[in-house]
Image: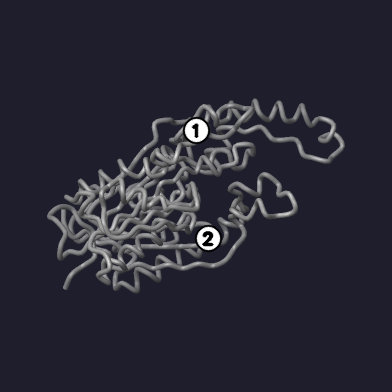
């Protein structure tokens, strides 16, 4: 009986990087200026003085130490606090499609495939640069792939939701070789003006090749034992930017059109939800939690990952059991769990089992139970 396999993964890391120290220096300068400009309003109580950021606060709140970004000068400019990404012409490849290509080529090389072998391209990301044409179709053309392509968005869970779509497509026969891509330019939707949010995100792109064991080439492969998705509506993570903004009569607060969250409530709600989801999913596949060798979790917050892993294991996880990439990449939204899988699956042997899981706005949780089938 054929199995559905992950046969390759790839990662694009942007050229620019920013340390916590650089971010703190930039926002501190911006806040000193803002507080001076709003001195009278602050003294009257109309607005609150903006707090100064600190490296200590960032590390304690998140475990993030560094991030890669597509463009850093604009983000570190106290008068801009946003990446400076020039508009590209319609005859130029889009920035998200451009990010996808090196990640795709690495994943395809691992799988022993070329773009011509791909007949389904799915781009899943928390933010897409345009409504249409789909970034996925642009990538499809650039790779010389056939079949079909489309974009989708389930925020930080976009990777696992897209992977289930890819698995279903291969299992049903509507595709033979599917490519899932997550080009996340999270620096574009991050709010660098506020101490609580300015440090959270980084940019990256991941790629995953999904195909049947009937047609897969020799090499490392991971059997997909099962996929599981769940959603539950919540406003605690929200971004109201959209095509209808220009049609609204009243003006929105600028901060409504970027990422925002009630972090403490998200922590309280999501951690038990994810732990219960993973436990139930593992049991549904006939495996046992104590046999899981790895938990490749969404990389949003170190405290969340530690609590989820501890809940599942009944003890504090060893570093290799629940690998963390926050210290280097920060939160890369949907790409995070795949980065963890891409960079931290060495040392496992054929027969070892692990869980790849993402979670985020929605709320949304998606997971794949994976068994290494070939070294």
> Where is mark 1, residue-wise?
86
In this view of the protein, can residue 159 be seen by the observer? yes
**Could you tell whether 359 is left or right of 205 in the image?**
right
Q: Disc 1 and disc 2: Cα gap in Å? A: 37 Å
Pick the residue in front: 322 or 195: 195
Pick the residue in front: 117 or 339: 117
Depth check, mark 1 against mark 2: the one in front is: 1
The answer to whether 220 is drawn above or below residue 229 in the figure is above
> Where is mark 2, residue-wise?
270
What x and y, as percent, mark residue 202? 47, 40
Number of residue marks = 2
In this view of the protein, can residue 305 be seen by the observer? no
Q: Give residue 167's quadrant in the image.
A: bottom left
Question: If the image is split into quadrants, where does the N terminus sit?
Answer: bottom left
Q: Measuring 33% from the left and 55% from the top, which residue is drawn there?
A: 180
Asked which secondary structure carries label 2, the reply is helix
Q: Measuring 35% from the left and 64% from the top, which residue is drawn there?
A: 164
Residue count near mark 1 (Cα–Cα under 10 Å), binned few <14, some 14–19, many ≥20? few
**Could you tell whether 102 is left or right of 49 in the image?**
left
Given the current orientation, which residue lies at the most extreme left position? 218
The answer to whether 201 is drawn above or below residue 171 in the figure is above
């Amino acid at each position: 009986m054929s199995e559905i396999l992950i046969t390759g993964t790839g990662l694009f890391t942007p050229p620019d990087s920013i340390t916590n120290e650089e971010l703190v220096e930039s926002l501190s300068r911006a806040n000193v200026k803002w507080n001076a400009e709003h001195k009278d309003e602050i003294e009257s109580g109309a607005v609150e003085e903006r707090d100064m950021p600190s490296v200590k606060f960032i590390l304690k709140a998140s475990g993030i130490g560094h991030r890669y970004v597509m463009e850093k000068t604009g983000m570190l400019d106290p008068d801009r606090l946003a990446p400076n990404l020039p508009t590209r012409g319609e005859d130029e490849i889009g920035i998200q499609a451009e990010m996808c290509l090196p990640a795709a080529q690495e994943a395809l090389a691992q799988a022993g495939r070329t773009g011509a072998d791909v007949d389904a391209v799915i781009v899943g990301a928390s933010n897409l640069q345009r409504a249409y044409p789909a970034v996925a179709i642009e990538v499809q053309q650039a790779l010389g792939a056939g079949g079909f392509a489309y974009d989708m968005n389930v925020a930080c869970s976009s990777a696992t939701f897209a992977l289930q779509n890819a698995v279903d497509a291969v299992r049903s026969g509507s595709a033979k070789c599917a490519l899932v891509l997550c080009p996340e330019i999270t620096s574009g939707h991050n709010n660098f003006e506020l101490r609580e949010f300015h440090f959270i995100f980084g940019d990256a792109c991941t790629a995953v090749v999904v195909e049947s064991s009937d047609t897969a080439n020799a090499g490392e492969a991971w059997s997909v034992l099962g996929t599981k998705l769940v959603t539950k509506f919540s406003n605690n993570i929200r971004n109201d930017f959209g095509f209808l903004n220009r049609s609204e009569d009243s003006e929105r607060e600028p901060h409504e059109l970027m990422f925002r969250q009630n972090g403490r409530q998200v922590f309280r709600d999501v951690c038990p939800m994810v732990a219960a989801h993973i436990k139930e999913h593992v049991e549904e596949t006939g495996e046992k939690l104590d046999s899981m060798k790895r938990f490749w979790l969404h990389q949003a917050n170190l405290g969340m990952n530690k609590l989820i892993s501890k809940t599942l294991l009944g003890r504090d996880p060893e570093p290799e059991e629940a690998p963390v990439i926050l210290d280097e990449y920060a939160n890369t939204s949907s790409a995070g769990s795949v980065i963890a899988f891409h960079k931290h699956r060495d040392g496992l042997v054929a027969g070892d089992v692990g869980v790849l899981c993402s979670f985020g706005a929605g709320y949304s949780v998606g997971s794949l139970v994976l068994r290494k089938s070939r070294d």
